[in-house]
């Protein structure tokens, strides 16, 4: 099926190439003739470079993602043609109103001019307001630690202040300060990037080699070169501005040849950005280690942040004892404070009384806070994921019976019948959330008869007569308590779940990194078809807004079927049903035998993690640091049972989401390269420089948008400015991939229409 966006980009490449070649022919290669003039100072060139600075960095990252390193080589070809188009636009503008396309081409010219203005306004708002603000916010977030929610208002406030100051200055010098800031920031960016590349041995040679080989060899030439060329053409022309009225900023007394240097400067900035991205490692490389976890029920890469003292159990005259690991430094005859960790998903310490619809739990001290019952899925594939648990809020009543004291837990919702719910939905339980158990332990030496080796055993000292009732050490271990762990002072909190960093990940200790989990290309195989013919999945908030499911073909991914779906929240789960009357999920085996169970393609899940040293990780420790996801729950506790919730990253990894990568989409991908060269200082410097380029770019596109708005509506500059500021505020909160899908066609359409004007008028260059 024809993709209109791809078709528009292909048209852009064709029009760009045709216009560039005609200008080179009619203008006698102005790119080469104007090199001397291009090196001289020019106010028009500085103003165009204000919009090209961050655009070059962003475009380089996008081009690398689309076509690999070889995309940058195509960028230089685009820059060569773009330089001639800048010259042509300035020369044609010198002709004045007589050569205006709207006058010389009749009604077609008027329509073309109006459409160009409308497309330019859309490009200024989508790419200049939304996307540029999002990219600037991402750079400030990862570079200087500015929260994303604060970046939009801050950038909008600075743009508004600069715009108000510019109104008080003469028209010819209204944005001279911004242009100077852009020129300084662009020079600072080039200096910083070049210094970072020199500091990393072999980065320049390896990067340039990858660019050359990627542009001309094998599969890249067939599959990636066209996409790379399209990205290079798109963003070099967009950032530099051919066809969008770039000559309007010029001085009639300035030779047109001085604009020739804009596109090559953009290509230099893009090349440096591309080399930095390559020096910082593959942006798509997972950040978490892929090694299997030693923690039961944990995803790959998960590590413990406290030392488990035991390596086994052994009965003795002292009762249940724990065989201690070697090298812990615990001495026989001494006492230690230790703790057994409770499972956030609860323990099977209660019993369902069907006739009374309640759960009874002994009045243990570890159960003093119990106010809910947890039911787990019986299916082995889902039982290990806490997202499928069902939490039921309960009232608690303490009662005395002839066999002892108990807590009676009764569902707060009188419509919930525990026994019926467990039977109808194949749930296992009941499990109840308990407290950690702390106790004083002693260590003694024992000799094993089989090997005649001395072992150290840990056991619980006899409890005082007035101690609260609690299960014995053996019962606690049988209930699924983890440990024992050292608990000096008797107040050590349970550590969060941590993940070992992947080898080669460029991370700095004590920094906060922003990560992203993506769904597999063909969707997430999650949940099951229940008895009602619904796809039942955990109530994760990232799934709630989905409107399409995928029926994967068993052999050919090209034959996957996309099905519109509706969702509802019921009994602690999300349930999806087909919105297509011809497709019923419960009858897929009969109606679609060649397709599998429906899958969901959720949006990316974004989260932050702190980078810490692995000093608390028991041996064998990972070589690098560990990352601790920042979540309301230190460890995945699962489905709350009454509403949508944001899952812990571990739950998503267990469900099949791909290993996390850095949440950097565009310009922020250069920061790891700066960090590799200069540490955290390099990232901060890069964030500040790119932040300055963002501000200059926003001012450039605000001014450009106001001009396009005036052409469309005959005025309304204030209204355009207001809409632009709203876009700047909203941009950082938007998904960058979605913004790119909006900005790319808007810019492409603007460039195609603007380049068409130059293409139509290019023969006049020979006459003049």
Image (tube, rainbow, N blue to C red):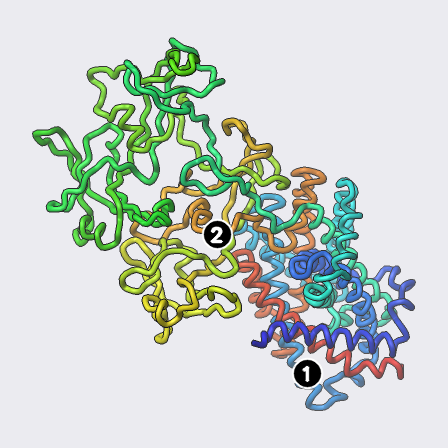
Q: Position of residue 120 (x, y in %)?
A: 65, 73
Compare residues 395 and 427 and report the one nearer the observer.
427
- Along the horizontal axis of the image, is 391 left or right of 694? left
The residue at which mark 1 appears reads as 112
Which residue is depicted at the point 51% across and 29% down? 617
Q: Nearer the viewer, residue 117 or 59?
A: 59
Viewed as shown, does residue 474 lie left or right of 484? left
Image vertical order of residue 388 relative to residue 49, above or below = above
The relative height of residue 298 versus residue 495 in the rendered view (above or below) is below
Query: Crowding near pointer 2: few (<14 within 10 Å), some, many (20+)?
Result: many
**Residue 666 showing in the rendered view:** yes
Give x and y (percent) for residue 359: 18, 41
| Residue shown at the point (49%, 18%) measured from the top left | 327
Placement of 758 over or under 400, stated as above or below: below
Numbered mark located on residue 497 in the image: none
Residue at the disc numbered 2: 657
Of the 4 image quadrants, the one containing the C terminus is bottom right
Q: CA distance from mark 1 to mark 2?
A: 47 Å
Looking at the image, is mark 1 or mark 2 earlier in the sequence?
1
Query: Mark 1 or 2, which is nearer the eye?
Result: 2
Return the residue found at the far bottom: 106
- What residue is drawn where x is 68% and y is 68%? 704
Q: Is residue 538 above or below residue 4?
A: above
Nearest to the observer: residue 461 or residue 746: 461
Q: Between residues 715 and 126, which one lies in front from this camera angle? A: 126
Q: Secondary structure at mark 2?
A: loop
């Amino acid at each position: 099926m024809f993709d209109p966006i791809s078709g528009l980009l292909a048209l852009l490449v064709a029009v760009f190439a045709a216009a560039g070649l005609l200008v080179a022919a009619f203008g006698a290669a102005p790119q080469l003739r104007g090199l001397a003039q291009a090196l001289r100072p020019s106010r028009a060139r500085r103003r165009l470079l204000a919009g090209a600075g961050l655009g070059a960095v962003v475009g380089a990252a996008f081009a690398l993602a689309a076509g690999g390193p070889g995309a940058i080589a195509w960028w230089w070809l685009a820059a060569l043609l773009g330089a001639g188009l800048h010259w042509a636009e300035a020369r044609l503008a010198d002709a004045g109103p007589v050569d205006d396309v709207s006058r010389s081409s009749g009604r077609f010219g008027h329509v073309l001019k109006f459409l160009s203005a409308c497309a330019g306004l859309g490009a200024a708002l989508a790419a200049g307001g939304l996307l540029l603000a999002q990219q600037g916010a991402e750079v400030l977030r990862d570079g200087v630690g500015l929260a994303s929610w604060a970046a939009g208002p801050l950038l909008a406030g600075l743009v508004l202040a600069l715009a108000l100051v510019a109104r008080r200055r003469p028209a010819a010098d209204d944005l001279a300060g911004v242009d100077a800031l852009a020129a300084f920031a662009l020079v600072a960016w080039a200096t910083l990037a070049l210094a970072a590349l020199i500091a990393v041995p072999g980065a320049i040679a390896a990067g340039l080699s990858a660019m050359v080989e990627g542009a001309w060899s094998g599969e890249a030439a067939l599959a990636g070169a066209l996409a790379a060329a399209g990205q290079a053409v798109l963003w070099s022309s967009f950032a530099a501005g051919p066809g969008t009225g770039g000559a309007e900023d010029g001085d009639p007394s300035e030779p047109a040849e001085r604009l020739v240097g804009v596109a090559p400067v953009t290509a230099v900035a893009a090349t440096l950005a591309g080399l930095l991205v390559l020096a910082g490692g593959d942006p798509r490389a997972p950040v978490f280690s892929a090694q299997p976890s030693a923690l039961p029920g944990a995803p790959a890469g998960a590590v413990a942040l406290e030392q488990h003292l035991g390596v086994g159990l052994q009965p003795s005259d002292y009762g249940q004892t724990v065989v201690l690991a070697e090298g812990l430094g615990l001495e026989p005859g001494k006492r230690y404070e230790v703790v057994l960790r409770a499972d956030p998903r609860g323990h099977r310490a209660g019993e369902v009384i069907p006739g009374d619809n309640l759960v009874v739990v002994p009045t243990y001290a570890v159960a003093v806070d119990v106010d809910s019952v947890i039911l787990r899925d019986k299916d082995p594939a889902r039982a290990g994921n806490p997202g499928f648990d069902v939490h039921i809020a309960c009232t608690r009543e303490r009662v005395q019976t002839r066999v002892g004291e108990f807590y009676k837990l009764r569902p707060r919702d009188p419509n919930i019948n525990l026994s019926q719910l467990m039977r109808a939905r194949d749930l296992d339980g009941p499990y109840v959330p308990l407290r950690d158990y702390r106790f004083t332990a002693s260590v003694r030496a024992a000799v094993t008869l089989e090997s005649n080796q001395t072992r150290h055993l840990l056991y619980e000292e006899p409890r005082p007569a007035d101690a609260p009732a609690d299960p014995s050490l053996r019962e606690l271990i049988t209930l699924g308590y983890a440990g024992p762990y050292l608990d000096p002072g008797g107040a050590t909190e349970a550590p969060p779940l941590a993940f070992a960093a992947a080898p080669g990940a460029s991370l700095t200790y004590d920094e906060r990194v922003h990560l992203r989990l993506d769904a597999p290309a063909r969707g997430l195989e999650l949940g099951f078809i229940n008895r009602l013919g619904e796809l039942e999945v955990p109530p994760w908030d990232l799934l709630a807004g989905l409107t399409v499911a995928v029926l994967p073909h068993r052999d050919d991914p090209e034959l996957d079927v996309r099905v519109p779906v509706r969702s509802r929240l019921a009994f602690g789960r999300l349930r999806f049903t087909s919105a297509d009357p011809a497709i019923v999920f419960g009858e897929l085996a009969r109606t679609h035998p060649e397709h599998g169970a429906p899958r969901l393609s959720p949006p990316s899940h974004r989260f932050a993690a702190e980078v810490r040293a692995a000093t608390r990780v028991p041996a064998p420790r990972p070589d690098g640091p560990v990352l601790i996801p920042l979540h309301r729950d230190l460890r995945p506790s699962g489905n709350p049972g009454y509403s949508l919730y944001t899952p812990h990253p571990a739950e998503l990894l267990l469900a099949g989401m791909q290993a996390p990568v850095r949440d950097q989409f565009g310009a922020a991908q250069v920061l790891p390269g700066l960090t590799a060269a200069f540490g955290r200082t390099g990232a901060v410097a890069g964030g500040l420089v790119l932040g300055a380029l963002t501000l200059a770019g926003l001012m450039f596109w605000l001014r450009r948008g106001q001009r396009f708005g005036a052409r469309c509506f005959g005025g309304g500059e204030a209204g355009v400015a207001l809409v632009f500021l709203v876009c700047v505020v909203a941009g950082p909160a938007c998904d960058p991939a979605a913004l790119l899908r909006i900005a790319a066609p808007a810019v492409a359409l603007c460039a195609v229409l603007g380049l068409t004007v130059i293409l139509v008028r290019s023969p006049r260059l020979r006459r003049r």
